[in-house]
Image: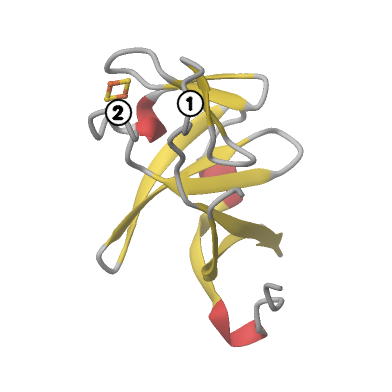
Amino acid sequence: MQRPPTQAEWIQISEAETIPPREGRAVQVGALNVALFNMGDRFLALENRCPHQGGPLAEGMVGGTTVTCPVHGWRVCLETGLVTKPCVEGTPQVRTFSVQVRDGLVMLNLASSKVAA
Ligand code: FES
């Protein structure tokens, strides 16, 4: 069972208003490159690396709750990190992270890193 993140594990990333709705931004947090997406009613984050050949997911087109990799068109679910197209056995996946908006600031929690089961 995964424990809930502590207050100290949240990192301030950016002002929420700097990321337009339905767009992503790449943010570097230490050694990790994270793709942060403004879904309009919430923010979602996942590792900014397509599981196919490493394409920058933050630059992909958002449709519903998936992003289409700009390199070869694989689709990745922004909520789970699972590849939804192509559907292959042993579906590759991308790590996801918890995001909160507090007082207009986007906060990221790397300790909440998750890979869907
Ligand atoms: S690198 Fe993303 S689909 Fe090929």
> Residue sitting at 32 percent across and 40 percent down?
49
Q: Give the residue number, with chain letter if any, for mark 2.
A: 52
Most extreme residue toward the front is 89
Left or right of 55: which side holds 63?
Answer: right
Secondary structure at numbered mark 2: loop
> Residue sitting at 34 percent across and 33 percent down?
50
Q: Give the residue number, with chain letter if any, for mark 1.
A: 89
> Looking at the image, in which quadrant does ligand 1 appear?
top left
Residue 90 on image: x %, y %: 47, 33
Name the residue nearer the viewer: 84 or 89: 89
Residue 108, by quadrant, is bottom right
> Residue sitting at 53 percent across and 53 percent down?
115
Label placed on residue 47: none
Vertical placement of residue 69 versus 11, above or below: above
Left or right of 46: which side holds 10?
Answer: right
> Residue sitting at 66 percent across and 83 percent down?
7
Please state which amino acid type lies under the numbered disc 2.
His
Please state which amino acid type lies under the numbered disc 1.
Glu
The local crowd at label 1, few if under 14, some if 14 to 19, many if 20 or more residues have their Cα within 10 Å, is: few
Total numbered badges shown on the rendered structure: 2
Of discs 1 and 2, which sits in the foreground? 1
Residue 36 on image: x %, y %: 49, 45
Secondary structure at numbered mark 1: loop
Mark 2 sits near ligand 1, with its Cβ under 8 Å away: yes
**Residue 105 seen anywhere in this rendered image of the structure:** no
Give the Cα separation between the discs numbered 1 and 2: 14 Å
Q: How is this picture coloured? A: secondary structure
Residue 22 on image: x %, y %: 59, 26
Circles 1 and 2, Cβ within 8 Å, touching? The answer is: no
Most extreme residue toward the right is 41
Vertical placement of residue 49 versus 7, above or below: above
Name the residue nearer the viewer: 105 or 25: 25
